[in-house]
Amino acid sequence: MLVAARHVLGELESATRDLREIRDGRDRRVRFTARCSTTFPWLPPVLRAFREREPDTEVRIVTVADDAPIPALLADLVDVALVTKPDAQMDRVELTPLFEDEMVAVVPAGHRWASRTHVTARDFTGVDLVLYDVYDQSRIPSAPLPLPPGARPARITTMPLVTDLVIEMAAGGQGVAILPNWAAAPYASSHGVALVRIGAKPATRTWYCATRPGPRSPRLAAFVEELTTRLTGPAR
């Protein structure tokens, strides 16, 4: 009870401080969330550059459900969201295109697909898959499977949004994983897996920086500028 009480009191003190700053027009937070990502190797350079410009501003990384960054943005729970999947309310926010990434099949290095240039929908017939749990088809609404049209996989195993777990399952031959190329590439040599293109042309998706419509505070504008510069420029 004492541990819980200290935790609650700490949260109350933080909330009180936040409300006081908002009341006095001194709110110096930028609240950020990113969809469907388990690692942020690009974030430290963004934070360093932003801190040089706005040393008194605090960036808070907010965790929201994978299907809820746009609702969180509209509810003023976050200020900036990094999103990729379509949302019914996308037309209510401002979207800045950032970059495209490619979804690839991850298989053991000795897998029959490992030496191929790409796989097609037919190749997935009867194949077991290992996917993030955001693709759990029992969820309502469910996310479309990251497969080419006409693919007919067998068993689909969903895992928590932890890339290491999904890679370990794929490396152990428990199924073919479908992951973003940038998330899977660091594991290619260390875990003995191969990345295979899905389709003759890359299966890409577009990422956006989403904000609420209307004027932006100087610190929010600075954070969005650093974020978009990092994720659209040569550094990316």
Image: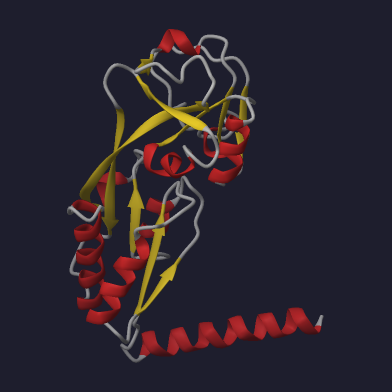
Left or right relative to 182: residue 210: left
**Would residue 116 appear left or right of 162 to someone viewing this image?**
left
Identify the residue at horizontal 47%, vertical 64% (top origin).
62
Q: Position of residue 128 (x, y in %)?
A: 59, 19
Q: Residue at x 58, y 38 (%)?
A: 166
Position in image of residue 41 (x %, y %): 39, 57
How far across and how far down the image is residue 66, in percent? 48, 47
Q: Residue at x 54, y 15 (%)?
A: 153
In the picture shown, does residue 155 fall above or below 142? above
In this rendered view, identify the residue nearer to me: 202 or 118: 118
Q: Can the viewer see residue 210 in this picture? A: yes
Quarter of image, res 156:
top right
- Residue 203 to residue 134: above or below: above
Q: Say whether residue 142 is left or right of residue 218.
A: right
Q: Position of residue 164 (x, y in %)?
A: 57, 45
Query: Is residue 150 in sight in this rendering?
Result: no
Query: Between residues 166 and 134, which one lies in front from this camera angle?
Result: 166
